[in-house]
Amino acid sequence: MKIALLGYGKMGKIIEKIATDRKHEIVLKIDLDNQHELTVENLQEADVAIEFSTPATVLGNIDKCFEAGTPIIIGTTGWYDQLPKVKQLCEQGNNSLMYASNFSVGVNIFFHVNKVLARLMNNYPYYDIQVEEIHHTQKLDSPSGTAITIAEGIIENLDSKKEWVNMLTADGAETADDNVKSDQLLIESFRIDSVPGTHTVIYDSEVDSIEFKHTAHSRNGFALGAVLAAEWIQGKTGFYSVQDMFDFK
């Protein structure tokens, strides 16, 4: 399989290594320094594009892949307000796209069990709940896309929570209002040194606490999942989320 990498930072380099270890070929690498090489002709040399860039560039990269007819796997977050429009363009053009806040196999198992647990906890309303996420200090967005997906999974399945709110702690300073209402789900975001990513769901009552946690040891799990998605989408057209690939029952 021939792969175009749209975004060649830390994640792009890890994806490159995992892809080549799996006998795939990288035929295009796009970063800030060579945007002029992102052409329809170059994209058409690839069987799939894997996109880990920025919210400011992802929509343009999607448009270019659609123009080239190249399937695209998107790990960038921060553009989901455009999902309906992008889905329409994808389906109208008979293109192929998969997106995810996190492609890690372990995280997607976590997403699924999180929903099951939230449905179960409807029976025990004396537990309150919050989400904590910890990432490296270079991470610019807050909360993480993974934390948002976790929170949305809870809100969809737990009657007592209607929306999420975020509180960020970075360099010792809290930058959000901590007056959380009873029907709001708090996401506490921490930025600590070089942590790849830790996400914890906490159910707390007067008598005990239940914690459900995923800890990433490196970015390799995210990168492997993106390559698996690129393999999965071969021969398919349509607009997919990573849930379509895992299809947990």
Image: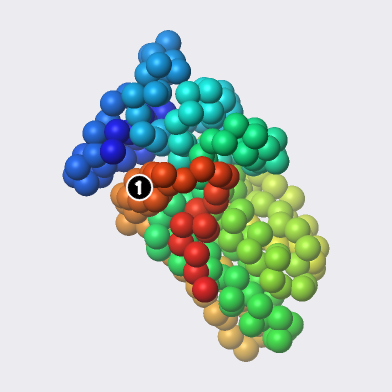
Residue 149: percent from left, percent from top: 59, 56
The image shows residue 123, relative to residue 3, as above or below, that is: below
The image shows residue 35, relative to residue 67, as above or below, that is: above
| Residue closest to the eye, 101 or 202 | 101
Residue 96: percent from left, percent from top: 51, 39
| Residue closest to the eye, 91 or 15 | 91
Q: Residue at x 70, y 66 (%)?
A: 156
Q: Quadrant of the N terminus?
A: top left
Residue 243: percent from left, percent from top: 52, 58
Is residue 88 visible from the viewing direction of this image? Answer: yes
Q: Quadrant of residue 35?
A: top left
The image shows residue 70, relative to residue 113, as above or below, that is: above
123 sits to left or right of 239: right
Q: Residues within 10 Å of mark 1 (few under 14, many from 20)?
A: some
Residue 162: percent from left, percent from top: 78, 63
Residue under pointer 1: 231
Q: Residue at x 40, y 16 (%)?
A: 41
The image shows residue 202, relative to residue 5, as above or below, that is: below
| Residue closest to the eye, 104 or 144 | 104
Identify the element where label 1 is drawn. Answer: helix
Q: Residue at x 50, y 53 (%)?
A: 242
Q: Amino acid at mark 1?
A: Glu
Q: Residue at x 52, y 73 (%)?
A: 249
| Residue closest to the eye, 80 or 64 | 64
2 sits to left or right of 51: left
**What colour-coding does the image apply?**
rainbow
64 sits to left or right of 49: right
